Image (cartoon, rainbow, N blue to C red):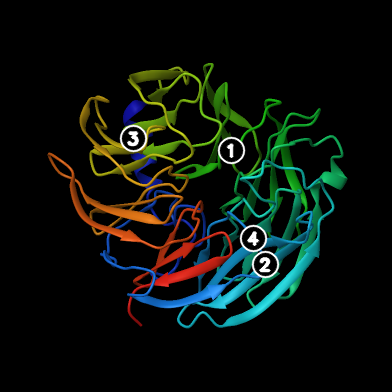
Amino acid sequence: MIRHFALAALLAFIPWLAAEPNDWPQFRGADGTGVIANPYPTSWSGSEQVAWKVGLAGRGLSGPVVAAGKVFVTSCAGRQEDRLIVQCLDAATGKELWQRQLWATGSTACHPSSSMAAPTPVADAERVYALFATGDLACFSHAGDLLWYRALCQDVPTITNQVGMASSPMLADGMLIVPMENVGADSFAAGIDVRTGQTQWRVERPREENWTTPVVVRRPEGWEVLLLSGNNLAVLDAATGKEKWRYAAEGLSTIPSAIVGPDGILVPGGRAGELVLVRPSGDGQPAVAWRQRLRTRYATPLRLADKVYAITAADVLQCMNAQSGEVVWQLRLKNGPYAASPLAAGGLIYCLSEKGLCTVVRPGAEAEVVASNQIDDVFMATPALAGGHIFLRAERTLYCIGGR
């Protein structure tokens, strides 16, 4: 059973969106790992190695996504952030191809550091799906045609989150996985048909504020969805929403997401301040392989080869052995804090701070800082890596790094 799970977990690393090599269609890339094999630029500044720079139509914290030569990004505008914006830009030039705006139907209350444009959109070969913290969900064609729209807070009026929702939707074999966990009477996750916008299944989730993004896994018998909240990790069948198994524990993460590796699922801790590797055992119940003291803030950990890398709440990049959890080395990062999740390209790790410092690290027996790149802007979104370019989303600006 454990060997079967390890094989299935390895299959999770296959790019399941049938993405082109130049695509980055969702949060942390086509396969959700945040890792790509090709090398990417390592040195830049606000004026050097910037292919283009575009002012966005509004403010936001969502990451950009790239599909079929287009960059999709969401923003919000207006005094109450009730004007919701989806922009489509040419990835090569930054030229705006189209812009669409919606009026918010749900509450726009949130923490001052957050935004209604906090969830990262997701794209496939034909469509882009944009979820906002107001519960408004829109599907556009790549040409900008509105294909369907859902006002989820109108459908479920008891949704309540006064500090703002930020979990991103994900795709799994024609199903859009929409996380809507909140403190209201109806906290849930839903599977929505990408063609029609109709809800195919809906499962109850803990009533709490939660900003983790679901993880989708391709297994031989079908697709799975991993939902992480403060007291459980639930593994569901993506087609039906039926729960297969869960790991229950107090103090799990409500911000950094889980990550899947060939030897199990890494579950970050919140209040518990631990990183835990769990596997289903022979009877389907999860078993804990190891625990390591780790207090994260916003950033999802990164699995690269046989190591795990995580940015702690103290702005330290910590390297751990993936099989044992043993700490290998630690590197104090500068100019924090860090909200964006670390990414890896060509074997190097990229860590972007909120103050615009991107530290490029070569991992090994010790950490080697390859470059420190500063752009004076505010960055909370996880970057996108596509077509040899790095797309950095600041609050009101999108930067494309790399020569044309």
Q: Indicate left or right for 270 with 402 as reference.
A: right
**Hey, what amino acid is under mark 2?**
Val
Instruction: Specify the farthest residue to the left.
Output: 365
Q: Nearer the viewer, residue 297 or 125?
A: 297
**Hey, what amino acid is under mark 3?**
Ala
User: Gap in Å between the C-alphas at discs 1 and 2?
Assistant: 30 Å
Q: Earlier in the sequence, mark 2 or mark 4?
A: 4
Nearer the observer, disc 2 or disc 3?
2
Residue underneath mark 2: 86
Q: Position of residue 356 (x, y in %)?
A: 42, 56
Residue underneath mark 4: 59
Category of crowding for the residue at label 3, using alpha-carbon neighbours closer than 10 angstroms: few (below 14), some (14–19), many (at least 20) = some
Nearer the observer, disc 2 or disc 4?
4
Rendered view: 97 above or below 228: below
User: Gap in Å between the C-alphas at discs 2 and 3?
Assistant: 39 Å
Q: Indicate left or right for 364 with 194 as reference.
A: left
Residue underneath mark 3: 6
User: Gap in Å between the C-alphas at discs 2 and 4?
Assistant: 11 Å
User: Gap in Å between the C-alphas at discs 3 and 1?
Assistant: 18 Å
Rendered view: 360 above or below 306: below
Q: Residue at 51% across / 79% down in the picture?
A: 94
